[in-house]
Amino acid sequence: MSRLKLANKLAGAVRRYYEQVLSAITGFRVSFQQSAHSKKEGRVARRGKRVYDEKSDGKSERGSRPTGWMSDWLAGWLAGWLTSWVVGDVVGAVAGSLLLVPPMLLVLVLSSMIDAT
């Protein structure tokens, strides 16, 4: 297997993992935007079906589904909000622990100085 295929499989697995985690946390189905390459492959695969659908019932695939800009915007906003929330918690925990370390060291030093006298 080439490195590119291996990297794509790994990226897909990581993407699916984070989609599942975010879906479990939020209770909504989370789906990250596909790459342009996979979108093109999907369009090529659906081209024959779309032509058949247009001939059979007179409706195109594009006309029968919403554009989805609102769901894309909402998913992007939600992902950004969750990311900032998680990053904020991590930064807050690290900063809080760093703020607690100097007073604890001061107490330890003072208590050892008191014990030494």
Image (cartoon, helix red, strand yellow):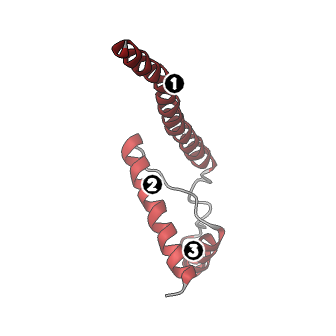
Going by the numbered disc 1, the residue's amino acid type is Leu
Distance from Cα at disc 2 to Cα at disc 3: 20 Å
Q: Is residue 1 above or below residue 35?
A: below
Kind of element beneath mark 3: helix
Mark 2 and 3 residues: CB-CB less than 8 Å, in contact? no
Task: Looking at the picture, tell me which residue is in the foreground, 96 or 56.
Answer: 96
Q: Nearer the viewer, mark 2 or mark 1?
A: 1
| Label 2 – label 1 distance at C-alpha | 34 Å
Q: Secondary structure at mark 1?
A: helix
Q: Which residue is mark 2?
A: 19
Q: Looking at the rendering, which quadrant does residue 4 occupy?
A: bottom right
The x and y percentages for residue 31 are 50, 55
The Cα–Cα distance between marks 3 and 1, rounded to whole angstroms, is: 52 Å
Label 2 residue SS: helix
Position of residue 95 relative to residue 117, above or below, is below
On screen, residue 107 versus residue 59, left or right, reads: left
> Which residue sits at x=47%, y=31%?
93
- Disc 1: which residue: 99
Q: Dot 3 corresponds to which residue? A: 42
Query: In terms of depth relative to the viewer, which is nearer, 105 or 89?
Result: 105
32 and 41: which one is in front? 32
Q: Which mark is residue 59?
A: none
- In percent of width and height, residue 69 lies at 63, 49
Q: What amino acid is found at the position of numbered circle 2 in the picture?
A: Glu
> Which quadrant would residue 41 be assigned to in this image?
bottom right
**Amino acid type shown at disc 3:** Gly
Q: Quadrant of the C terminus?
A: top left
Q: x%, y% of residue 100?
A: 46, 23
The residue mark sitting in front, 3 or 1, is 1
